[in-house]
Image (tube, rainbow, N blue to C red):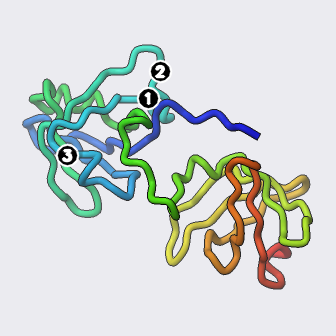
Amino acid sequence: MSRAEPEHLVVGQVSKAHGTKGDVLVWPLTDRPDEVFAAGATMLLGDDEGSPGPAPRELVVERRRPFKKGLLVKFEAYDDRTSAETMARRYLLVAVDELVPPDEDELMYHQLLGLTVETADGTAVGTVREVYETEPTHLLDVKGPERSFLVPLARRIVKTVDLDGGRLVIDPPEGLLDL
């Protein structure tokens, strides 16, 4: 089963303008914010749902610095608070082919969406519809025919991820699928 790869991935969300010189507070949605938001990096300003839309604006990072749990980012051509406010609550996207590919043992979460989930004995559980970044482990939201399940994305539970076959095999501890 071949699945279409998206052209762009969401790498951050602009929260709001910060200060008077065009900086915005960005919540990074990537494991590699230093690479993605490096000076000179380009990205698209998407809409408030994470889509590039019909005429997305290209942004170039001028500078960035850590701020609380996010980043303060200044984009070229956004030199005052008024222009920066136009980016508030919108997503930032990068072309997939511009991102550093994941290591051999890594996945990008969008690759898990739509995978069929089954247990090690072949029992169908459902389809992955979302990945939640939680501590101590991330959770898969799996939609079954009658209800949804939250399955920890942990090696002790997720035994096989077969992207080409479109399936994910789990070995859930007793009671996990009864919750």
Q: Nearer the viewer, residue 148 or 15?
A: 148
**At 50% across and 60% down in the image, what residue appears?**
104
Q: Identify the mark nearer the N-term, 3 or 2.
A: 3
Distance from label 2 to label 1 (Cα)? 7 Å
> Compared to 78, does 34 lie above or below?
below
Disc number for residue 53: 2
Q: Earlier in the sequence, mark 2 or mark 1?
A: 1
Q: Which residue is mark 3?
A: 38
Residue plotted at (67% across, 51% down): 163
Mark 2 secondary-structure assignment: loop
Q: Which residue is mark 1?
A: 47
Q: Secondary structure at mark 1?
A: loop
Name the amino acid, label 3: Ala
Front one among 139 and 164? 164
Q: What secondary structure is marked by label 3?
A: loop
Q: Residue at x 37, y 47 (%)?
A: 100
State the separation of the CA atoms marked 3 and 2: 24 Å
Q: Quadrant of the C terminus?
A: bottom right
**Quadrant assignment for the N terminus:** top right
- Residue 33, x across and y down, in percent: 29, 53
The answer to which of 48 and 12 lies nearer the viewer is: 12
Question: Contact (CB < 8 A) between labels 2 and 1?
Answer: yes
Q: Residues within 10 Å of mark 3 (few under 14, many from 20)?
A: some
